[in-house]
Amino acid sequence: MKKHNYSAGPCILPQEVFKEAAQGILNYQDSGLSIMEISHRSTAFVDVMEEARNLSLELLGLQNKGYKALFLQGGASMQFLMTAYNLLIKKAAYLNTGTWSSKAIKEAKIFGEVVEVASSKDKNFNYIPKNYQIPSDVDYFHCTSNNTIFGTQIKDFLDVDAQLVCDMSSDIFSRELDFSKFDLIYAGAQKNMGPAGTTLVVIKEDILGKVDREIPSMLNYNVHLEKDSMFNTPAVYAVYVSLLTLRWIKNHGGIAAMEKRNTEKADLLYKEIDRNPLFKGFAEVEDRSTMNATFNLVDESKKEDFDKLWKDAGINGLNGHRSVGGYRASMYNALDIESVKVLVETMQKLEKQS
Ligand SMILES: *Cc1c(COP(=O)(O)O)cnc(C)c1O
C-alpha cells in the first residue's frame, strides 16, 4: 500500500533520490565501492561536496554574490550557538516565534546581550509578531522563517539595517525569496533536503572575523571555510543524499517550481480545514505555513475514529507535536499533491460518517 508520509522531520524525500542513494551505498558510480567506504579526500567525494555547495548557492540565486556554503554537523541546534559565537559582539536581536527560536535565544545569551524584539508566546506561538522595532545598535537580527512545530511562517522579511540571520531548517528550497537579504542562513538537512546528520550554512563571507573572542576550531566558520567544509570528516552520506535532492530540485524546475507545488498542496489542505466543520486550524490564517499545517478536531471525542481512518488510508506521521496537540501535516517538497488529496478525502470521510 502506498504510504503518504507527513512526518515533520526526518521526513519524506523523493523516491528517485532514495533509489539512487541506495545504489550509491552498494556501488557508487560503478566503482565497485560504496560511497560510505571511500575517503572523504578522494576525488569522488570531493566532487560531491563541491557540487553540493555550489548547487545550494545556485538554487538560492547566491552565486558570485560573496556567499559561501558549508555542510556542517551538529544539526541546526549547533547553529544556535555557532551563530552567536561567531557574530555576537555585544548585543543581538531575536524574534521569538516558537520552540526553536527560544532555544536559539537561550544559546545566544551565553555570548552577550539578547533583545527579544517580539514574541508570540502569549498565544502559544500561533502567529508571527509584526510591527516590532529592532534596536539600531545590534550586531544582528535572528529569526526563524518557518515554525515547524506551530505551523507559522514569516511571509515578509523586514528590511533591517543589522545583519540578518535566519533559521530556515523547515522551509529552505521551498519558496522563492530574495535570499541576498540574508547574511547567514542555516538549515538542518532532515526537513527538506536530506537525511539527518548535516546542516547547510550559507554565509556572506564579509560578516566574519569581527568578534574578539577565541573560537574553538570546530565552531569557527572561518576554519570550515578555509578547508572547504572538510576541516574534519564530513557527514559523507548525508551530504551525498542532500546533493541528490538538490539535483532533483534543479531538474524539477528549481525553487520556483517547488513553491508552485507547495502552494497548491497547502491551499488544498487549508481549504478543507476551513470548510470541514469537524476541524479548525491552529495558526492565524495570514501566517499559515505552506510546509507544516497544524489543525485540531473541534470535538476531541472523534479522535479515535479519525486516527483509524487516516492510518487505514496509509497516512503516516500526522500527529501534532506534544506542545500543540491535534494534527500536523508536513508537506515538504517531495510530498505529492496526491497524498494531500488522500488526506482531504479522509477528512471528508470522517464528516460523512459523523
Ligand atoms: C528541526 C528544527 C531545528 C532543530 O534541528 P536539529 O537538526 O535537530 O538540531 C531547528 N530549527 C527548526 C526551524 C527546526 O525545524
Image (cartoon, rainbow, N blue to C red):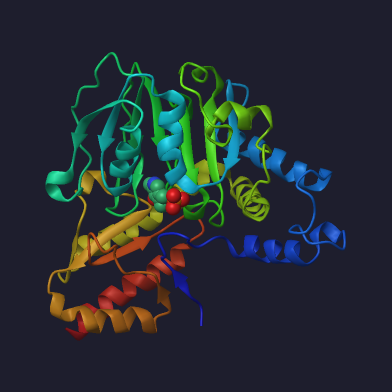
Does residue 224 lie above or below 345 as drawn? above
Image coords of residue 46 (percent x, y): 76, 42
Tell me if 171 is positioned left or right of 269 in this view: right
Residue 56 visible in the picture:
yes
**Residue at 18% in and 80% down:** 302
Tell me if 45 is positioned left or right of 302 in this view: right
* Residue closest to the eye, 205 or 8: 205
**Residue at 29% in and 14% down:** 137
Does residue 109 lie above or below 7 as drawn? above
Residue most extreme to the top: 137
* Residue closest to the eye, 147 or 264: 147
Residue 172 visible in the picture:
no
**Residue at 53% in and 17% down:** 206
Q: Quadrant of the C terminus?
A: bottom left
Count of all numbered marks drawn on residues in the image: 0
Tell me if 19 is positioned left or right of 96 in this view: right
Image coords of residue 197 (percent x, y): 56, 53
Residue 35, image quadrant: bottom right
Image coords of residue 92 (percent x, y): 31, 24
Image coords of residue 139 (percent x, y): 36, 19
* Residue closest to the eye, 337 or 318: 318
Does residue 162 lie above or below 149 as drawn? above
**Residue at 33% in and 74% down:** 345
Tell me if 88 is positioned left or right of 59 in this view: left
